[in-house]
Image: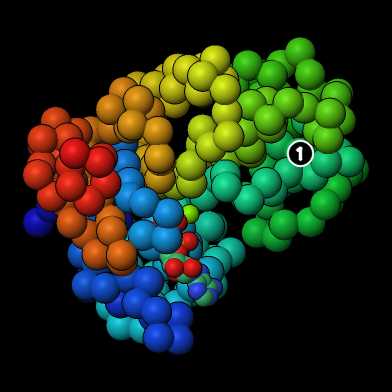
Amino acid sequence: MTNAVLHVADVHKSFGGLRALSDIDLQIVEGTTHAIIGPNGAGKSTLLNVCIGRIAPDTGAVVFDGEVITGKRPHEINQMGIVRVFQTPEIFPDLTLLQNVMVPAFAKRDGAFRLNAFRGTDGETEIREEAEHWLADVGLAGYKDTQAASLSRGDKRRLELAMGLVQRPRLLLLDEPTAGMSRHDTNSTIDLLKKIKARGMTKVIIEHDMHVVFSLADRVTVLAQGRIIADGTPEEVRRSAVVQEAYLGG
Ligand code: ADP
Ligand code: MG
């Protein structure tokens, strides 16, 4: 027995004639930060989408905490504790930051994702306090009544992270947390993710920025053309000849 929280077992996925994922076998170990890297089009987002039930694999299975989750609906998988953030902005621009974080907090309790459904409900105060806690955790306490639309790109990512954390995930999936960020915002995101890592949360990070990968990951899997071409510690992967050639550019 391994202590894998998530096991992607022999997954294949084609889009028409394009093999987006071939023969993927991957285990995410409890408490680790696991990076998935690879060039554009390698299949990284497809792999995450398979894990959260947005894309059905052609063959193979995803096992979460010992239970096969392949075929379950995205909201069921989310309810079981797999939370994905980033890449597509999924904040509510017209709501305040506090309201943005209250929506998933309420959804976690209620099982349904409804805008403003928390208004006037039992437990609204409790949910508000929880949302305030996670906003403070990501460094946005001072902006709780600000409209989300007015945030900088870096702060929008922080808000999304708070919206993920308020769900108290068992497994947090981050799709390119620093994409398009300045070096300053990237560094502050690394610090925030390190803080979360120190709490022992299991995370999968898809990331292009090698600085981010090597500062955060315990384990790295390299994808290219839908296949795993290397897997190991950051040092092992960095030294791997196949990775140097295929991805890091020699
Ligand atoms: P990455 O996230 O590593 O950049 P993706 O998983 O987004 O890669 O894409 C892998 C490949 O699958 C790419 O060639 C992409 O064009 C293709 N692809 C992804 N999603 C779809 C889709 N829904 N329909 C058709 N092709 C897709
Ligand atoms: Mg992608």
Residue at x 69%, y 19% (from the top left corner):
140
Above or below residue 92? Residue 7 is below
Residue 20 visible here: yes
Disc 1 under 8 Å from ligand 2? The reply is: no
Above or below residue 112? Residue 13 is below
Q: Position of residue 205 (x, y in %)?
A: 39, 42
Q: Which residue is at the front of the view, 112 or 206? A: 206
Residue at x 52%, y 49% (from the top left corner):
84
Where on the picture, by quarter, is residue 155?
top right
Q: Looking at the figure, which quarter contains the C terminus?
A: top left
Residue at x 72%, y 57% (from the top left corner):
113
Q: Is residue 31 left or right of residue 3?
A: right
* Residue with the most extreme front position: 250
Residue at x 77%, y 27% (from the top left corner):
151
Q: Which residue is at the front of the view, 168 or 17? A: 17
Q: Which residue is mark 1?
A: 100
Q: Position of residue 218 (x, y in %)?
A: 23, 33
Q: Position of residue 32 (x, y in %)?
A: 27, 37
Q: Position of residue 71 (x, y in %)?
A: 44, 78
Residue 80 visible here: no
